[in-house]
Amino acid sequence: MPAIRKTFKQHLSVYAWLTIGAFLAAFSISVILLPNSLIDGGTVGIALILSKLFGESYLSLFLILLNLPFIYMAYKHIRKSFIITMGVAVLLFAGFLIVTARIPPFLGDPIEVIVAGGALLGVGVGLIIRHGGCIDGTEILAILINRKKGFTVGQVVLFINFFIFFAYGWIFLNFHYALQSMILYIVAFKMIDLVIMGIEELKSVLIISKKPEEIAHVITEELGLGLTIMHGKGGFTGDTREILYIIVERLDLSDLKEIVLDTDPMAFMVIENLHEVLNGKNSHLPYKKKSKNLS
């Protein structure tokens, strides 16, 4: 298989976004989390705990050292090209932690700290992940466990982070900060999803019906959505049938279901989440022509 070659402009764009993401994540850690005795999950959380035990000036060093084994694991078991973007992201993040440590801290109410810190951290990490980087080595471990044991990446990361937050509360005898850190992590996690998936949530819909032509006509005329007709065969009956495949925005999903079930109350629908839709080299929302108003 030929290697994927990116243009200089594409490389520049990737590393620019990695830089922005690393700065936002580091700003959140140095200016908001550390001054308010909160931590993140994963290797960043462990590095924060160690920095509180041995000195905050060692935070960047701990972060790099903790991620080195996972970078090696990525090199051996995932793909060699990934370690470049991960290594760059980790180094940028560690460097910005040193720079942002000089910025005056943000001290506020717990809710302000959790929301502001979690949002900035989530946007920063989301930008890094969206552009092929990573600053948390536990995700690498989670991917490898997923391949061997079948647990999802999310389950493994959540399991690891539970013990990190518990250890933080136990070591410093303050489970209030540990609980607040966990809530902040949830805020950051949701922001990561928002950055990676985008504001416009897309759905893919498979429709199996005895009236595929009628449904296709109503969908294209009323909603203005494009669709694909696939030819299938029933596994039990052996009957040939046409299957409709549609990509739809979340806001149109309710109207789509209503149209399908009004046309064929016995229609079978499968709805799944989509992160991104590509048409060639461009990202697109579902094609829509000018639609008629639903009566």
Image (cartoon, grey):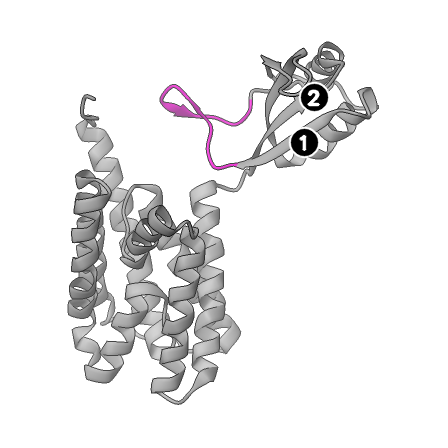
Q: Determine the residue positioned at 24% across, 31% down.
A: 10
218 over 274 or under it: above or below: above
Tell me if residue 37 can be seen.
Answer: no
Magenta segment, prevailing SS (helix, strand or loop): loop
154 over 233 or under it: above or below: below
Looking at the rendering, the stretch of residues picked out in magenta corresponds to: 274-286
Q: Which mark is residue 59?
A: none
Q: Is residue 213 left or right of residue 244?
A: right
Residue 216 figure quarter: top right
Residue type at numbered disc 2: Leu
Q: Determine the residue positioned at 68% across, 21% down.
A: 208
157 over 171 or under it: above or below: above
Q: Which mark is residue 252?
A: 1
Return the residue at label 2: 223
Q: Position of residue 100 (x, y in %)?
A: 25, 66
Q: Is residue 259 left or right of residue 40?
A: right
Q: Position of residue 195 (x, y in %)?
A: 44, 46
Q: Determine the residue positioned at 47% across, 41% down.
A: 197
Q: Secondary structure at mark 2?
A: helix
Asked if the residue under mark 1 is in contact with the one under mark 2, i.e. CB atoms within 8 Å, the reply is yes
Specify the quadrant that holds the N terminus.
top left
Q: Is residue 183 left or right of residue 29?
A: right
Q: How many marks?
A: 2
Asked if residue 178 is among those painted magenta in the image, a careful observer would answer: no
Asked if residue 283 is among those painted magenta in the image, a careful observer would answer: yes
Q: Secondary structure at mark 1?
A: helix
